């Protein structure tokens, strides 16, 4: 038994969360090299490369809200929060640039409740949404879901604009599954391949990707090791998973995967700079930081919510 | 006085008032637009609409610039953003602005986020208080070669007077700037218009303390044509054909080696006929009480010598009779009974000349030394004549004589019967003192300043007398007292109303009597010694640091109307400021001319 240490900082947990007895998912099957698992060396692209767009989003619950029905004693939960998404476009030659950064500020009510908040000075205004779910965590989950949707919309658009698009996270929310769009998955919560293949994934050397496997009926996927790792790091250090739509067929999908696999290693995160390096790519790390910044000061946001609720109470209960 | 206008929208925007940095009534930051080029000293305007409906414009001067890449948290991020280009980041340029003025005068900060414009045209005039200036005179050009003005009312003694110029030798161009100001006043139409009806009687006395440099300002500058930008700069100042000082009289001290009766100078770079030898006749020496300037070293004031000097000065006046047939020379003989002991009264007496035999003739400084030795320290240990010594101890009288004897070779030659006094008959008079011993320099400066000051007493402010004096620290040092320092302090405090205006220069203001610096309405600083920069509190810390890197020709001008010092440049002079410039044409031009002559002959 060898002892390793996780590259990610402890606060971010581990990117490898697979249970030891995980048998893989039934819908996953190796397709590229027949039923075999192989390592495909990457072809690193130096200098200028095709125009690539990294898309990511952030979200933040800013205040938990309640509606209390005095007659029934029922409590409905809601959240006031914000989400933002945007992109970074790069071509290896010009300075990477931010694009299409959008912020949305929402109040989401669970239990089918409604009710907006009045605007507050300083530019605070909320759009109101309602979900049927009564679970306490449902409003926040809805916020996350909306962020993913927003990411997917931007990814579709940039893809249509001719960019090779890399979306942070799996492709689940993309409506239009046309190439070239690639999901970039940093964490591994469950095994996808059967155990005999799954245990061979750590054999991948830096820059190499695994054979492509199908994932259900809509996606292809493969693992790749992004960057060289130190002897101290665990076997899964620096391993990410790419997802591409199946709709165009295996050959075009393979071609897109190879293009991305050639480009992303140079954008790998820097260990001392990013607690989730190397998986968290540099443009994505910078994008997350600016998006978080664009959400505004969290203290001010909370204060604005309180002020809005205060206004509301005065309207409802005039003196 | 031009009208204060509220001009229409200024030129295109250059940036926004930075909201991440607090904007105050004194300072604010601008976030620059990507296409804006804004450098130090640029003037900006920011207009906001107040809640009460009024419009308020802030005018300011850029005092510092900053650049950073937002998103770069570590220095190595810069490489990722700008080098390997794997990380996005936004380059930000900011400038800090010092507020010069608000129109209308409201003590409010600029609005964060407000758009800033370059202050040009009427906005620039507002920023530099041109509407407040009764008599604007161009005193230099800013970075963008627009003229910067000062109010002549602060130069002519009306609201203020005196100019103090500081900076290290060689690169600070203190004298050049003083001459530039004189040129603007005396040789240009706007300058003459400012001097007005008294213009023809206005005089400038310039002391030349370095080489024979200033003995050439009445000649065109041979190197002027090699500087094509200079003519354009002069034109910006409203001077279309800059040239030499037209009417200058040059004085140099009577030569030390001149025989009795001769009045030649030691000047090498000009023909003898073009430079007058100056000096004082024994009669003038006594009547003006110039003996006090023979003891102008600060250490002379700490002992009893000054007491003896006062006594001797008065006695000389009481004993002096004109020497028959030798104008300027004096016969020293006992005064008539009842002669006053009041100096002012004594010198008003019109005494008939006497022949040499009736007393001790005083034709030159040695005669004076001999005479005073006899009356103050007679031989064989006898006590001196108490009417002359004032009963001081013999050792003090001896010290006085020793000091006077030491001064004889230093300044004796400027006291001679035939010597011609300095007369301010031309608009500009240059008095060369560079070759004199320091004590003699103090004597000459003290004598001339007191002469000018005396002449102006009771005459009113105009016509004005400008005095350009470099190395002010020699004449009015911070520590100690001396007769000449007293005169300079007097000029600094009262000269304004008498129209005697000092354009003083020094390496470091800290070495000069503070009252003199304080009284200067215009303070000008050229290149400063980095160690000295701390002394100039009227400069912002940025400017102090920057002043230690100024190139020749750049000065900072602090004037009462404008609350921030403004850096200015002045053009290369079209008059010669040293021997080589005074020659016709440059070395290259002459070489080319002679080569061409040979070619023609060959």
Image: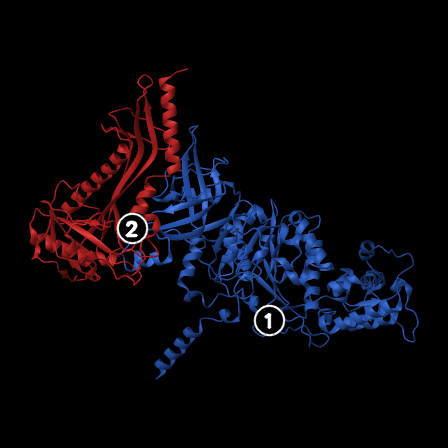
Chain colours: A red, B blue
* Front-lying residue, A186 or B134: A186
Quarter residue B165 falls in: bottom right
Please state which of residues A68 and B40 is positioned toward the viewer in this rendering: A68
Tag 1 residue: B273
Tell us which disc is closer to us: 2 or 1. Answer: 2
Toward which corner of the image does residue B12 lie, by quadrant?
Answer: top left
Which quarter of the image is occupied by the C terminus of chain B?
A: bottom left
| Residue B578 makes an appearance in the image | yes
Letter of the chain that mark 2 sits on in the rendering:
A
Query: Which label sits on residue A14?
Result: 2
Q: CA distance from mark 2 to mark 1?
A: 98 Å
| Furthest residue toward top | A319
Residue B292 falls left or right of residue B179: right
Q: Indicate left or right for A165 with A315 as reference.
A: left
Q: Residue furthest bottom?
A: B602
Q: Secondary structure at mark 1?
A: helix
Subunit ID for the residue under disc 1: B
């Amino acid at each position: 038994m060898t002892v390793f240490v996780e590259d990610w900082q402890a606060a971010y947990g581990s990117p490898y969360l697979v249970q030891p007895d995980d048998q893989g998912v039934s819908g996953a099957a190796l397709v590229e090299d027949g039923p075999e698992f192989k390592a495909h060396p990457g072809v690193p692209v130096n200098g200028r490369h095709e125009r690539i767009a990294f898309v990511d989003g952030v979200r933040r619950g800013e205040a938990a809200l309640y509606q209390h029905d005095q007659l029934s004693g029922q409590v409905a939960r809601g959240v006031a929060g914000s989400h933002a998404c945007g992109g970074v476009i790069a071509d290896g030659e010009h300075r990477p640039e931010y694009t299409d950064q959008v912020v949305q500020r929402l109040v989401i009510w669970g239990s089918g409740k409604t009710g907006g908040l009045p605007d507050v000075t300083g530019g605070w205004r909320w759009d109101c949404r309602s979900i049927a779910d009564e679970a306490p965590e449902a409003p926040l989950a809805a916020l996350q879901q909306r962020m993913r949707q927003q990411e997917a919309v931007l990814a579709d658009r940039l893809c249509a604009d001719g960019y090779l698009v890399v979306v942070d996270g799996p492709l689940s929310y993309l409506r239009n599954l046309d190439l070239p769009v690639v999901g970039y998955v940093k964490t591994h919560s469950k095994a996808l391949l059967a155990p005999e293949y799954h245990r061979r994934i750590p054999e991948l050397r830096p820059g190499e990707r695994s054979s492509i496997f199908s994932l259900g009926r809509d996606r292809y996927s493969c693992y790749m090791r992004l960057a060289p790792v130190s002897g101290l790091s665990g076997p899964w250090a620096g391993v990410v998973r790419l997802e591409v739509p199946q709709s165009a067929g295996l050959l075009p999908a393979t071609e897109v995967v190879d293009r991305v696999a050639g480009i992303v290693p140079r954008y790998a995160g820097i260990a001392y700079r990013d607690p989730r390096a190397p998986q968290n790519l540099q443009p994505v790390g910078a994008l997350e930081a600016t998006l978080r910044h664009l959400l505004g000061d969290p203290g001010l946001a909370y204060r604005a919510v309180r002020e809005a609720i205060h206004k509301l109470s005065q309207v409802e209960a005039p003196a | 006085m031009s009208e204060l206008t509220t001009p229409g929208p200024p030129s295109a925007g250059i940036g926004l008032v930075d909201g991440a940095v607090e904007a105050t009534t004194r300072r604010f930051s601008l976030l620059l637009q990507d296409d804006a080029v804004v450098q130090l000293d640029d003037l900006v305007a920011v207009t906001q609409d107040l809640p009460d409906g009024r419009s308020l414009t802030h005018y300011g001067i850029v005092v510092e610039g900053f650049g950073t890449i937002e998103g770069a948290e570590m220095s190595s991020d810069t490489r990722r953003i700008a080098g390997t280009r794997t990380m996005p980041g936004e380059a930000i340029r900011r400038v800090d602005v010092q507020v010069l003025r608000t129109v209308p005068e409201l003590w409010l900060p600029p609005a964060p986020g407000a758009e800033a414009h370059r202050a040009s045209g009427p906005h620039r005039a507002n920023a530099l208080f041109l509407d407040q200036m009764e008599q604007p005179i161009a005193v230099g050009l800013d970075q963008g070669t627009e003229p910067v003005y000062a109010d002549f009312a602060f130069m002519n003694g009306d609201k203020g007077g005196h100019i103090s110029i500081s900076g290290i030798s060689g690169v600070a161009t203190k004298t050049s700037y003083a001459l530039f100001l004189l040129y603007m006043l005396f040789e240009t139409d706007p300058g003459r218009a400012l001097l007005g009806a008294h213009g023809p009687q206005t005089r400038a006395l310039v002391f030349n303390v370095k080489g024979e440099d200033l003995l050439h300002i009445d000649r065109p500058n041979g190197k002027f044509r090699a500087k094509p930008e200079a003519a354009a700069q002069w034109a910006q100042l409203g001077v279309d054909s800059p040239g030499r000082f037209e009417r200058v009289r040059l004085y140099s001290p009577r030569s030390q080696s001149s025989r009795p009766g001769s009045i030649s100078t030691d000047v090498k770079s000009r023909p003898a006929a073009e430079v007058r030898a100056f000096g004082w006749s024994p009669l003038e020496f006594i009547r003006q009480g110039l003996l006090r300037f023979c003891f102008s070293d600060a250490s002379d004031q700490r002992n009893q010598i000054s007491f003896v000097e006062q006594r001797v000065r008065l006695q000389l006046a009481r004993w002096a009779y004109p020497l028959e047939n030798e104008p300027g020379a004096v016969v020293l003989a006992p005064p008539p009974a009842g002669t006053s002991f009041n100096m002012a009264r004594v010198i008003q007496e019109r005494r008939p000349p006497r022949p040499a035999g009736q007393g001790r003739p005083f034709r030159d400084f040695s005669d004076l030394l001999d005479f005073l030795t006899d009356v103050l320290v007679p031989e064989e240990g006898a006590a001196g004549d108490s009417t002359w010594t004032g009963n001081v101890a013999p050792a003090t009288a001896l010290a006085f004589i020793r000091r006077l004897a030491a001064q004889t070779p230093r300044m004796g030659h400027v006291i001679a019967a035939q010597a011609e006094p300095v007369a301010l008959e031309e608009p500009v008079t240059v008095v060369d003192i560079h070759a004199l011993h320091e004590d003699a320099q103090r004597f000459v400066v003290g004598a001339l300043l007191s002469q000018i000051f005396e002449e102006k007493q009771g005459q009113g402010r105009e016509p004005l007398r400008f005095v350009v004096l470099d190395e002010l620290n020699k004449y009015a040092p911070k520590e100690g007292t001396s007769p000449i320092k007293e005169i300079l302090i007097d000029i600094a405090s009262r000269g304004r109303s008498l129209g005697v205006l000092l354009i003083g220069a020094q390496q470091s203001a800290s070495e000069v009597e503070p009252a003199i610096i304080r009284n200067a309405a215009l303070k000008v600083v050229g290149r400063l010694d980095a160690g000295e920069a701390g002394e100039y509190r009227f400069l912002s810390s940025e400017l102090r640091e920057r002043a230690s890197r100024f190139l020749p020709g750049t000065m900072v001008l602090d004037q009462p109307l404008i609350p921030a010092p403004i850096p200015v440049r002045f053009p290369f002079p079209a008059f010669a400021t040293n021997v080589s410039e005074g020659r016709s044409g440059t070395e290259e031009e002459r070489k080319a001319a002679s080569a061409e002559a040979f070619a023609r002959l060959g």
